[in-house]
Image (cartoon, rainbow, N blue to C red):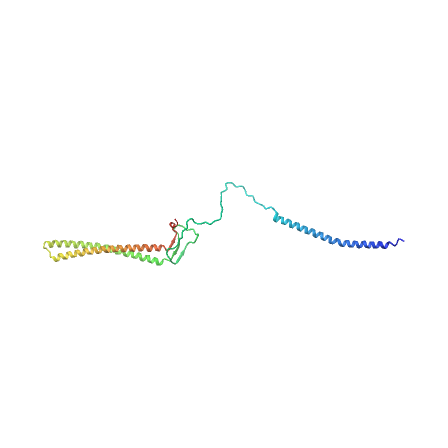
Amino acid sequence: MLEVPKPILKEAASSAGTRGKVVGKTRRPTTARILASVIALAVAIGAGVSAWEIFLRPIEVQVAAVERDVPVQVFGLGTVEARVTSRIGFKVSGVLIDLRADVGNFVAKGAILARLDDREQSAQVARTNATVQLADANLQRAAASVEKAQANYANAKSINERRQMLLKGNSTSIEAAQTAQAAQDAALADVNLAQSDVLVAKANIGDAIAQQQLQSTILDFYTLAVDLRRFR
């Protein structure tokens, strides 16, 4: 009479076995999810620590040591300019053949900055030098002529005075006395002419010297040098 419940026990067992199988199958996904959550949490924690290290960590500051008697220094932005500015350049035009300095260079007093081609002007200076020498020679020649003319005049005057005395004593002819007087007058004219030549020679040598100085000054313009008088 007790055999009837047995099949039910088998079904229950089989049902229990089936339930156990179902439960076993659902445990595996749950463990994977937990493991993934743990990994994600670890990654989030690592990212947070890295962010704190990069952005939120206090900045290390180096503390300066205490110093005494520190000199006062003032710093600022600005432009350095010369107190006195002077524009320099050539006073004559020409071909630049030598450039020894540029803007911003330090130069010494009297240093040559640049030079122009001065061959033509140098030839002009040489010509004026020759003119001065020629005028000086003419002046010396004129001075020598004056001395000679004065000597001739002194001789002619002496002769004329003797002839005039002889004429008063009737010891010579009127013609001889007149000739002596004419010779004296001619000698005096030669003296005056020689003295005029000296004046002309002096004027010529003065002009030649003036031209020489002018051309020499112009020649200096072909060389540009440092002259501190321009900056005072």
- Image spot of residue 4 (x, y percent): 87, 54
Q: Is residue 175 left or right of residue 228?
A: left
- Image spot of residue 167 (x, y percent): 11, 55
- Image spot of residue 147 (x, y percent): 21, 54
Can you tell which quarter of the image residue 173 is in? bottom left
Q: How many discs appear?
A: 0
Can you tell which quarter of the image residue 185 is in? bottom left
Q: Residue furthest top?
A: 68
Can you tell which quarter of the image residue 180 is in? bottom left
Q: Is residue 19 left or right of residue 219?
A: right
- Image spot of residue 158 (x, y percent): 15, 53
Q: Residue furthest left?
A: 170
Q: Is residue 206 left or right of residue 14?
A: left
Q: Residue furthest right?
A: 1
Of 115 and 85, the residue lying toward us = 85
Relative height, residue 62 to residue 23 (above, below): above
